[in-house]
Image: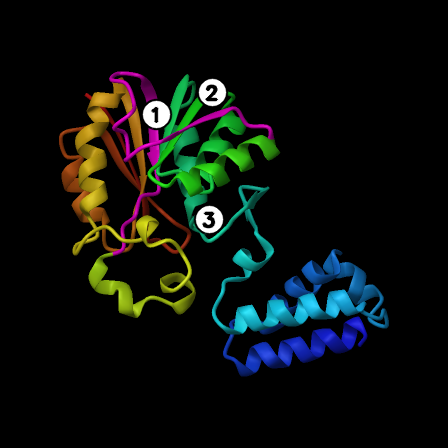
Amino acid sequence: MTAGTALTQGTQLLEGAGIAVPRLTAEVLLGFAMSCERVSFHAHPERELSETEWLHYGRYLDERMEGKPTQYITHRQEFYGREFRVTPDVLIPRPETEHVVETALDVARGAGRILDVGTGSGALAVTLQLETGAEVWATDISAAAAAVAAGNAAALGARVGIVVCDLMEAVAARSMDLVVSNPPYVPETAKAGLQREVRDWEPHVALFAGESGFDVYDRIVADAPRVLRPGGWLVLELGFGCHEHVQRLLAGWRDLRVVPDLAGIPRVAAARAV
């Protein structure tokens, strides 16, 4: 089996299974199976796959057709120009979450201590530490997720302290200049309507936040004034339809702003503690 034939057959299988962007997905999985960049087999489509490479490629295709996200197969996802390791213990970082980084860098220049609440893969914490050089801490209720975040911090050379706890319960009062979070915000009632890749594979503890989807926002905004120093910033990613509720929660804060994403959808809320 040549690389060119493998790519064609893989694309056809994925397309038949209704997988989005089948050609690109087949390219990524073939490159992962062959331990090479995609340009390599495009330049040499006549290259024969070894038996091991073919077996791996076939297994990856089967997993993807069963709904397993590509990132959980390759254990890779890029975020803010850096490659992060991901496992089913953590949410797959989304490009939209980069707006949290950009907003944090804008509103809290010079922040000395930063906290990422519900860090998951560590994408926010690691990125902010490397971009600012600040002292960064991160929390997660999942010990498995915290281990993934610690591995990413070590691999990327970021100095991030990671604590396993529920939200900010282990964080000292008046200790942070900036708190960021991409919290769970999907209502339990919306579970059936999610894509199977999300519903069946990503960790529910990082997705769902009660019947309304607001439970974790309520708790973070209630506790953030205890953790933040006076004038410190809270920066939250917003789920679809959450911005009005979060704006009401932050009504007593200073300098409230809501930042849209490239599609004009409210994506980030930021406000300063009194």
Q: Position of residue 274 (x, y in %)?
A: 19, 21
- Residue 118 versus residue 229 in the image, above or below: below
Q: Which residues are magenta?
A: 157-186
* Element assignment for label 2: loop
Quadrant of residue 1 within the rendered picture: bottom right
The answer to whether the residue labelled 1 contacts the one labelled 2, judged by CB atoms less than 8 Å apart, is yes
| Circle 3 SS class | loop
Q: Is residue 97 visible?
A: yes
Residue found 84% across the figure and 71% down from its top: 48
Marks 3 and 2, Cα distance to the nearest angstrom? 22 Å
Pointers 3 and 2 in contact (C-beta within 8 Å): no
User: Magenta segment, principal secondary structure?
Assistant: loop
Disc 3 target residue: 93
Q: Which of labels 1 and 3 is toward the front?
A: 3
Say if the magenta span includes residue 35: no
Picture coordinates of residue 95 (x, y %)? 47, 50
Percent of width and height locating residue 167: 28, 34
Residue 248: give its label. Answer: none
Amino acid at pointer 3? Pro
**Total numbered labels:** 3
Of 122 and 23, the residue lying toward us: 122
Amino acid bearing label 1:
Leu
Residue drawn at (74%, 56%), measured in percent from left and top?
A: 35
Q: Give the side of residue 17 with respect to residue 202, left or right.
A: right
Question: Percent from the top left, x then y, of residue 194?
Answer: 33, 66
Q: Are marks 1 and 3 in contact (CB under 8 Å)?
A: no
The mark that comes first in sequence, 1 or 3, is: 3
